[in-house]
Amino acid sequence: MAMPTFTLGIEEEFQTIDPQTRELRSHMSKIVEDGRITLHEQVKAEMHEAVVEVGTVICKNIDEARAEVLHLRRQVVELADRVGLKIAAAGTHPFSRWQDQPITPDARYDKIVEELQEAARSNLVFGMHVHVGIENRDIGVYMMNALRYFLPHLFALSTNSPFWEGRETGYKSFRTKVFERFPRTGIPGYFHSASDYDEFIALLIKTGCIDNGKKIWWDVRLHPFFDTIEYRICDQMMRPDETIAVAAVMQALVAKIYKLKSQNLNFRIYRSALIKENKWRAARYGLDGSMIDFGKQEEVPTRLLILELLDFIDDVVDELGSRHEVEYVLKMLEMGTGADRQLKVFRETGDLSKVVDYILSETTHGL
């Protein structure tokens, strides 16, 4: 069996902000239209007009991915600047209301809003998706089954949406609570093979549930059209360094599980219902809570589990050339997630506008 290339692709969803009011403001597709000149298909409009998405090209390794992420952030900040807007990286806006945000005119979005109604209109959330190249679909399904266990760990690191419509929600990631209103979200079930997975998608298409596999919005999925495994669980993180670090860990997990499989060592599979318990804890407490170690059948501080995860992937990061990026996770454990830092600013100032200012400054950190 040929060794997969473990290529990387990273998509980030940004908020477009009015610098005076700090509210979300529609970019009226200007950013996307202007961006097409230099970035072509790498910049896209999303369902709400105050969202702009950028995606890297296919990257051979984490160095290329880093260069792309930094380049795209610089470009999108510059494009926004031209139309008098700022770019913010967080899972939700601290106080803007979805009711005030126009939907992008597009037949595809019209169809989603018609079908999903309030769930779609209120889905004003911002995520980060990472694709890792897996050319063999049976291996891809094997990966999807195994990777589910680690999703809450990755998610805890990314939590960056503690506020919703001007309220402190008590969650480190409220974005996931909003997105869970959509069908076909969350931790996927177990699939025996690629054909089992394809039959499942075919049944949903045949019965009119979906028109294609992209309407399956799980936290991890074998992509219906590309040869990739796609992680979709993370909040949009503030600093580019955070995005790159988590993407490096995601790539290393795929490489490590592949390595175990090629040595005939299977990764233990756990029920979705158990993994959902850990996901809930990650959404509520971020890094500050504990999660369940199912092997030991006991609660363990989340930070310790993340250190164990770094140990687990340690023997593949040098082959991937990503040790430096993966080690940034230690810095993330030290400085806290985006949610922790947003909450700290709010505790100190009592002012959500100051929280937006903080997000804006972190979004361009290191550019």
Image: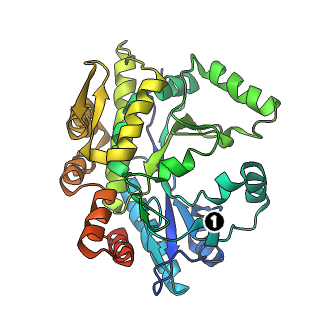
Q: Residue 214, relative to residue 189: is it above or below? A: below
Whole-percent x, y for residue 121 in the image: 66, 59
Q: Residues within 10 Å of mark 1 (few under 14, many from 20)?
A: many
Left or right, 244 with reference to 195: left
* Residue 198 in which image quadrant: top right
Q: Residue at x 46, y 87 (%)?
A: 20
- Count the marks: 1
Left or right, 175 with reference to 264: right
Left or right, 225 with reference to 273: right
Whole-percent x, y for residue 17 in the image: 49, 77
User: Is residue 10 visible to the viewer in this orientation of the structure?
Assistant: no
**Pick the front one: 195 or 315:** 195
Q: Residue 190, relative to residue 209: is it above or below? A: above
The residue tagged 1 is: 48
Amino acid type at image mark 1: His
Q: Residue 91, relative to residue 101: is it above or below? A: above
Q: Residue at x 81, y 35 (%)?
A: 208
- For the C terminus, the image quarter is bottom left
Whole-percent x, y for residue 237 in the image: 38, 58
User: Is residue 225 visible to the viewer in this orientation of the structure?
Assistant: yes
Q: How is the image coloured?
A: rainbow
Q: Residue 202, relative to residue 29: is it above or below? A: above
**Pick the front one: 189 or 169:** 169
Q: For mark 1, give the secondary structure.
A: loop
Q: Residue at x 38, y 57 (%)?
A: 160
Whole-percent x, y for residue 179 in the image: 56, 49
